[in-house]
Image: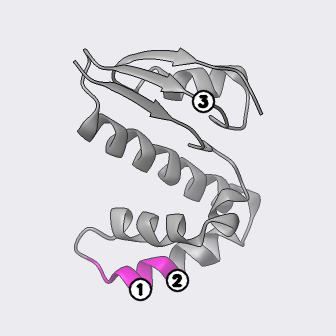
């Protein structure tokens, strides 16, 4: 069993991919699989800056990437402490994402 501390996941935060452009680059690598990463980056950026529906699709891919990366590291027996900035959206939506994350999770409310 391991203990982890994490913050700033920013699930479904519309501006996070602007504030942290490396996240968009990582999302392009995650989505590209066997495709050209630069081309995927261009497609995702265009979608992100397009309609609200397309932007939401990009944010859903971002959220799934975070879940997949989390679950590659954290096991069901691990303990995880959230230190803030978990996500944006309805309580139900964020709760549905957190339910997909492995580990025993604890929330420290803050900023």
Residue drawn at the location 62% of the way across and 44% of the way down: 10
Provide residue 48's location: percent of width, then percent of height: 65, 67
Q: Quadrant of the N terminus?
A: top left
Kindly state the secondary structure of the residue where label 2 is placed: helix
Residue drawn at the location 29% of the way across and 19% of the way down: 78
| Image position of 29 with respect to 81: above or below | below
The residue nearer to you, when weighing 62 against 55, is 62
Q: Quadrant of the C terminus?
A: top right
First of labels 3, 2 by sequence position:
2
Kindly state the secondary structure of the residue where label 3 is placed: loop
The residue nearer to you, when weighing 35 against 16, is 16
Q: Which residue is mark 3?
A: 83
Q: Nearer the viewer, mark 3 or mark 2?
A: 3
Q: Dot 2, crowdedness within 10 Å: few (<14), some or many (≥20)? A: some
How far is disc 1 from disc 3 in space, using C-alphas? 33 Å
The magenta stretch spans which residues?
Answer: 35-41
How far is disc 3 from disc 2 in space, using C-alphas? 33 Å
Residue drawn at the location 51% of the way across and 53% of the way down: 62
Q: Which residue is mark 1?
A: 38
First of labels 1, 3 by sequence position:
1
Residue 54 shown in magenta: no
Which dot marks residue 42?
A: 2
Quarter residue 2 falls in: top left
């Amino acid at each position: 069993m391991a203990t982890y501390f994490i913050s700033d996941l920013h699930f479904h935060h519309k501006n996070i991919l602007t504030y942290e452009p490396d996240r968009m680059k990582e999302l392009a690598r995650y989505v590209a699989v066997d495709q050209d990463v630069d081309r995927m980056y261009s497609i995702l950026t265009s979608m992100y800056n397009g309609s609200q529906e397309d932007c939401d699709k990009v944010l859903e891919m971002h959220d799934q990437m975070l879940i997949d990366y989390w679950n590659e590291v954290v096991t069901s027996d691990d303990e995880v402490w959230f230190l803030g900035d978990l996500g944006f959206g309805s309580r139900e939506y964020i709760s549905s994402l957190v339910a997909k994350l492995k580990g025993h999770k604890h929330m420290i409310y803050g900023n």
